[in-house]
């Protein structure tokens, strides 16, 4: 159990850092090693500032060092992989034809009109008639739908990243204050062994 305020738990610190990186990431025209290096510097600054606030409420530098190590060695590389893919999608217009420009949207509407004409001039079943209308009305919005879907997927990935840090903190024992040393360990033995020796003592 973590005895420190919630804001100093690994998932919450990770969420704060990810939100900060997302704001900084938008300033980069392309994703490369230089961008990752600058973002890493932002992480170091954020951890240093949060560490100063943590030091005001607790005297456990080992805990904060372990938290920072876990964030930089586990969460940050994973964030970089996700952000790199998302950055490429954003630059490509989320994979939309012609980047979702005006001409592509007009073409989608035109395809709808063409489909309606084909259905009107050929013996195609009537239940096909709504399809061209849907393409005519909704076609221009397809690039927006694509962008929304990719943004939603990315947001979920970042959310999963933050939640995974909760289990990561447990696995690495980042939640355990390191200054709470077991009495048996300080005497060179396990607690049950020390207790047994006390019972045998006259």
Image (cartoon, rainbow, N blue to C red):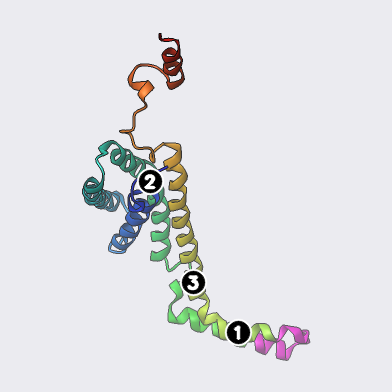
* 33 to the left or right of 146: left
For label 1, the crowd category at 10 Å Cα-Cα, with few meaning under 14, some 14 to 19 and many 20 or more, is many
Between 166 and 77, the one lying in front of the other is 166
Give the x, y percent position of residue 180: 33, 33
Of pointers 1 and 3, the one earlier in the residue sequence: 3
Residue 77 numbered tag:
2
Residue receiving disc 3: 97
Of pointers 2 and 1, the one earlier in the residue sequence: 2
Between 58 and 46, the one lying in front of the other is 58
Q: Looking at the image, do the residues carrying marks 2 and 1 touch, with CB atoms under 8 Å apart?
A: no
Q: Look at the magenta stretch and give its main secondary structure.
A: helix
- Above or below for 94 versus 201: below
* 177 to the left or right of 156: left
For label 2, the crowd category at 10 Å Cα-Cα, with few meaning under 14, some 14 to 19 and many 20 or more, is some
Give the x, y percent position of residue 183: 36, 24
Label 2 to label 3: alpha-carbon separation: 31 Å
Residue receiving disc 1: 112
* 42 to the left or right of 108: left
Label 2 to label 1: alpha-carbon separation: 45 Å
Q: Looking at the image, which residue is at 43% across and 21% down?
A: 191
């Amino acid at each position: 159990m973590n005895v420190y305020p919630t804001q100093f738990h690994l998932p919450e610190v990770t969420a704060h850092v990810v939100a900060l990186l997302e704001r900084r990431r938008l300033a980069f025209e392309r994703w490369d090693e230089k961008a990752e290096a600058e973002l890493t510097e932002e992480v170091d600054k954020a951890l240093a500032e949060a560490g100063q606030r943590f030091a005001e409420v607790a005297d456990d530098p080992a805990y904060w060092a372990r938290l920072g190590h876990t964030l930089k060695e586990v969460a940050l590389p994973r964030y970089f992989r996700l952000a790199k893919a998302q950055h490429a999608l954003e630059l490509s217009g989320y994979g939309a034809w012609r980047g979702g420009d005006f001409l592509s949207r007009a073409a989608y509407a035109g395809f709808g009109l063409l489909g309606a004409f084909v259905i009107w001039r050929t013996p195609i079943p009537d239940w096909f008639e709504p399809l061209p209308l849907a393409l005519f009305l909704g076609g221009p919005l397809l690039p927006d739908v694509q962008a929304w879907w990719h943004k939603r997927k990315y947001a979920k990935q970042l959310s999963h990243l933050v939640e995974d840090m909760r289990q990561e903190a447990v696995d690495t024992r980042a939640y355990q204050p390191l200054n709470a040393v077991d009495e048996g360990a300080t005497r060179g033995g396990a607690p049950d062994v020390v207790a047994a020796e006390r019972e045998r003592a006259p």
